[in-house]
């Protein structure tokens, strides 16, 4: 048993700087030195192993085992999802179905800003609620590229849109995990997050369109943006407070899609924006502002694969169905050389806690398996022969080989920093901010998601620290635990695995640094706004009345 050390140099500043080295190496390689993502990820992993072993005295075998554990978790579920989503996209594109789907959206609106709102925000939120783990960015990124958006626009805007729904993603998994590690009531946590995020569910659509086309372009369609945001925020508040975390995103996303579509039947902007370039210098396709001439049958056939995907992703996310599939297919392994061989120490936790490392091979209940089944059903419905299906899958695998390597390496970094305690050292730096802790504690959640790529993982990692720090400072543990999740959603757009998913879905692999540079300001600015709201809820009436 090895105990994590959070201040190995007996100097908090030096220890924090050392713990930050892997993050700095990774981000600098991507954003400033324009190194390819898989090489940058391997450099980040190497630096993480060196710092963990040399700086923080983690046994070398344990450190390597933690990295391999991350690789396994990177390939399943994350890699498995992106592989099968892109497989479905390739199937529909080769048969011409994706072109029909793309052009059928003009039946609702030919305005690029409204298409972006409908696809990236409303439709993407449904996939976040039903599946999470990269599914919404993969789907909406591919759809925006099909609509003619520039690769940077499709990637960056999909990432910005995939924020407000994240805390309740995958049928409430982040909130359920947060309740598990903190011992707080899941319904109270759901309600507290529901007192924070609806504000941003209204703000994010405006922010999204502003990022695409500027203030004047956004102001010209503000009624539609408000409808999309309010139709999401109101159900998000009501369901999270009066039902629980499970169906928040699904219900809110369906509401947003329905109300926005109905609104666009009776309202269109005075000037139709037909350019997909927006503020992006690398272009975008212009389209004529006319409605497509496909028959209803052709449109239904084009949408059918994505409707099948939506249905199966939702079913695969239902706990009862997942439990049934796990009963016949799941295998769990105590990861060799790691399981319960490291322990987290105070003050990160109240008492020493051995870290579990159990790999769950849920090959049938994994979201990616549901996506694969949807793709196979759709392929047969589109008239593919078995040999052709295998050929397309092999081509997809070759296309994604570097992306899968990158995702595996990114998760290896995250798991190495977790089991070595590097991320906890960074977290403790935030926890020592005293009266400013509500603000910086929120940014701790942002950091957690940026490091791990998952709001669930961030909640598991820092949930206990948030509760302990809040109790020591006389703050509400419920408020700060919820702030970890709410702040974390804004880190989703800059976590490395999401950026790789976006670059892969938009066929722009190798440009991850450009995507990171574009979304970073949006991420930190929105995270700071969440931090300000949490600070107001901690200290200023009437915001304090929101805290249960």
Image (tube, rainbow, N blue to C red):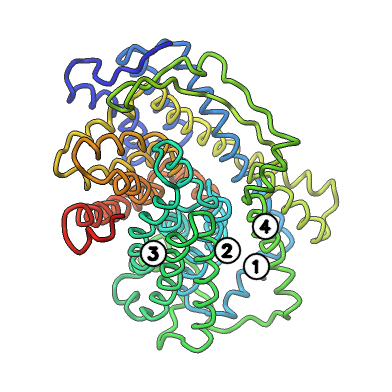
Q: Badges 3 and 1: C-beta atoms under 8 Å apart?
A: no
Closer to the observer: label 4 or label 1? 4
Of pointers 1 and 2, the one earlier in the residue sequence = 1
Residue 487, placed above or below residue 100: above
Residue under label 3: 201
Closer to the observer: label 3 or label 1? 3
Mark 4 crowdedness (10 Å alpha carbons): few <14, some 14-19, many ≥20: many
Mark 2 crowdedness (10 Å alpha carbons): few <14, some 14-19, many ≥20: many
Give percent across and percent down for residue 285. 50, 69
The reply to whether residue 514 is in sight is no
Mark 1 crowdedness (10 Å alpha carbons): few <14, some 14-19, many ≥20: some
Task: Report the disc number at residue 99.
Answer: 1
Of pointers 3 and 2, the one earlier in the residue sequence = 2
Residue under label 4: 309
Closer to the observer: label 2 or label 4? 4
Closer to the observer: label 3 or label 2? 3
Q: Rounded to the nearest whole Å, what is the CA distance between mark 3 and mark 2? A: 26 Å
The N terminus, quarter of image:
top left
Q: Is residue 442 left or right of residue 132?
A: left
Residue under label 2: 146
Residue 457, placed above or below residue 321: above
Q: Badges 1 and 2: C-beta atoms under 8 Å apart?
A: yes
Residue at the far left in the pictured view: 435
Helix, strand, or loop for circle 2? helix
The C terminus, quarter of image:
bottom left
């Amino acid at each position: 048993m090895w105990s994590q050390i959070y201040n190995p140099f007996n100097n908090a500043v030096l220890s924090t700087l050392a713990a930050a080295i892997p993050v700095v190496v990774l981000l600098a390689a991507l954003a400033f030195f324009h190194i390819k993502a898989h090489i940058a990820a391997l450099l980040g992993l190497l630096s993480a192993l060196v710092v963990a072993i040399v700086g923080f005295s983690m046994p070398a075998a344990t450190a390597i085992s933690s990295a391999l554990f991350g690789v396994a978790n990177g390939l399943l579920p994350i890699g498995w999802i992106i592989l099968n989503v892109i497989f479905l996209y390739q199937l529909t594109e080769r048969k011409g179905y994706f072109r029909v789907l793309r052009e059928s959206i003009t039946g609702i609106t030919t305005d690029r800003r409204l298409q972006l709102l409908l696809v990236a925000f409303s439709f993407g939120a449904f996939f976040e609620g039903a599946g999470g783990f990269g599914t919404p960015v993969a789907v909406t990124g591919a759809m925006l590229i099909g609509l003619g958006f520039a690769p940077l626009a499709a990637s960056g805007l999909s990432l910005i849109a995939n924020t407000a729904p994240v805390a309740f993603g995958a049928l409430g998994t982040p909130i359920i995990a947060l309740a598990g590690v903190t011992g707080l009531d899941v319904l109270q946590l759901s309600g507290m997050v529901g007192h924070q995020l609806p504000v941003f569910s209204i703000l994010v659509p405006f922010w999204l369109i502003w990022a695409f086309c500027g203030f004047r372009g956004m102001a010209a369609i503000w009624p539609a943006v408000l409808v999309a945001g309010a139709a999401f925020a109101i159900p998000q508040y009501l369901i999270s407070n009066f039902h629980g975390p499970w169906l928040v995103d699904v219900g809110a996303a369906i509401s947003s899609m329905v109300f926005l579509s109905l609104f666009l039947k009776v309202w269109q902007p005075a000037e139709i924006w037909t350019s997909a370039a927006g503020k992006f210098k690398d272009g975008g396709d212009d389209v004529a502002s006319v409605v497509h001439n496909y028959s209803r049958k052709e449109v239904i056939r084009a949408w059918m694969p994505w409707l099948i995907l939506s249905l199966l992703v939702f079913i695969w996310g239902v706990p009862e169905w997942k439990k049934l599939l796990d009963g016949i297919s799941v295998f769990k392994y105590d990861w060799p050389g790691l399981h319960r061989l490291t322990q987290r120490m105070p003050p990160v936790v109240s008492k020493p806690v051995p870290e579990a490392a159990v790999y769950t091979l849920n090959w049938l209940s994994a979201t990616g398996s549901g996506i694969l089944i949807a793709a196979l059903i759709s392929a047969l419905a589109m008239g593919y022969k078995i040999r052709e299906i295998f050929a397309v899958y092999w081509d997809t695998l070759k296309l994604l080989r570097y992306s899968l390597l990158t995702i595996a390496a990114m998760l290896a970094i995250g798991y190495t920093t977790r089991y070595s305690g590097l991320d906890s050292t960074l977290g403790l730096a935030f926890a020592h901010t005293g009266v400013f802790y509500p603000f910086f504690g929120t940014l701790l959640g942002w950091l957690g998601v940026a490091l791990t790529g998952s709001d669930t993982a961030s909640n598991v990692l820092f949930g206990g620290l948030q509760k302990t720090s809040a109790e020591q400072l006389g703050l509400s543990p419920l408020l700060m635990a919820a702030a970890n999740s709410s702040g974390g959603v804004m880190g989703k757009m800059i976590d490395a695995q999401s950026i790789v998913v976006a670059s892969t879905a938009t066929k722009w692999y190798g440009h991850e640094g450009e995507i990171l540079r574009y979304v970073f300001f949006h991420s930190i600015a929105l995270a700071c706004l969440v931090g300000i709201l949490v600070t107001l809820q901690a200290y200023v009436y009437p915001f304090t009345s929101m805290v249960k």
